[in-house]
Amino acid sequence: MKPVIIIAIAVVLLIPLPIFAETFTVKTNKSTYLEGDVILISGTTNPATSNVISMVVVNHKGDIVTIGQFPTNPSNLKDFSYSIDAKGPLWLEGEHTIKLRLAGKNIEIQFDYVKKDIIENKISTKSEQIVCPQGLEPVNGECPDKPVVEVTSEPKLGIASFVDKSKDPQSYIDRYNSEPSYKKWFDENYPQYKTIHEAVGLELTEKIPDWVKNIFLWYGQDQVSEDELLNAIKYLINEGILLVD
């Protein structure tokens, strides 16, 4: 009997056993999908006893979104592909996982999902026209608590070279207004100055910038602080617009 047992074992060892897939790879065509997109799954595997791939897609809560089953390519068992329509009530904003199984081997791949209504809400929010109270302009999409004042001024030329600082500046203005020849001489030789007042260091008090006028208006409406009002007055004094004895 022993020789028979040995022969039987030898025969069993010669019977070819099933060879399971040694490799199983999968990928999606994108890492992020919008609602309504088509998810394309593709991959490769070695020939196995089963050429049917089982698939489950779950959302970040662990709920099953969709299931499917598809064969590998009949003409080439190493390649496979499958497509999914990314839409439905179970598709949630966030990460999703595709779980595939072939011949006892499992593989997973993750992707992000974005709801279309969330994108539309973000776009509509940005496109909404923001209307702020009178005197206020939107800043970074929001209405500020008080006006944002941007102070801009042209560089000062300084006092003209012909001015004798020991003399009263008003004397030059009086001469400019009373002597046509002196007026012509000044206008031709010092065109960079807007007025004789600016040349002698006595700018006209009525040349108050609009932003300063607004400061006084906003102060009366309690939209700016007293410190901001004082800063505006200091500016007028420093620029020679407001004369203080």
Image (cartoon, grey):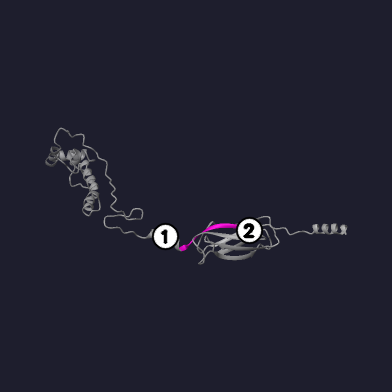
Q: Where is residue 50 in the image (x, y as percent from the top left)?
A: 69, 62
Residue that appears at 22% across and 43% down: 234
- Which secondary structure class fits the magenta region best? strand
| Circle 1 crowding by C-alpha within 10 Å: few under 14, some 14–19, many from 20 | few
First to last magenta residue range: 107-116
Residue that sits furthest to the bottom in the current view? 89
> Quick one: label 2 or label 1, which is nearer the N terminus?
2
Residue 28 visible at all: no
- Specify whether 28 is left or right of 204: right
Q: In which quarter of the image is residue 141?
A: bottom left
Q: What residue type is labelled 2?
A: Asn
Q: Quadrant of residue 74?
A: bottom right
Q: Where is residue 95 in the image (x, y as percent from the top left)?
A: 52, 58
In the image, is residue 115 part of the stretch drawn in magenta? yes
Q: Which amino acid does label 1 sit on?
A: Ile
User: What residue would you read off at disc 2?
Assistant: 106
Mark closer to the observer (2, 1): 2
- Specify whether 76 is left or right of 40: right
In this rendering, is residue 135 above or below 178?
below
| Circle 2 crowding by C-alpha within 10 Å: few under 14, some 14–19, many from 20 | some
- Specify whether 131 is left or right of 207: right
Q: Where is residue 164 in the image (x, y as percent from the top left)?
A: 17, 33
Q: Where is residue 235 in the image (x, y as percent from the top left)?
A: 23, 43
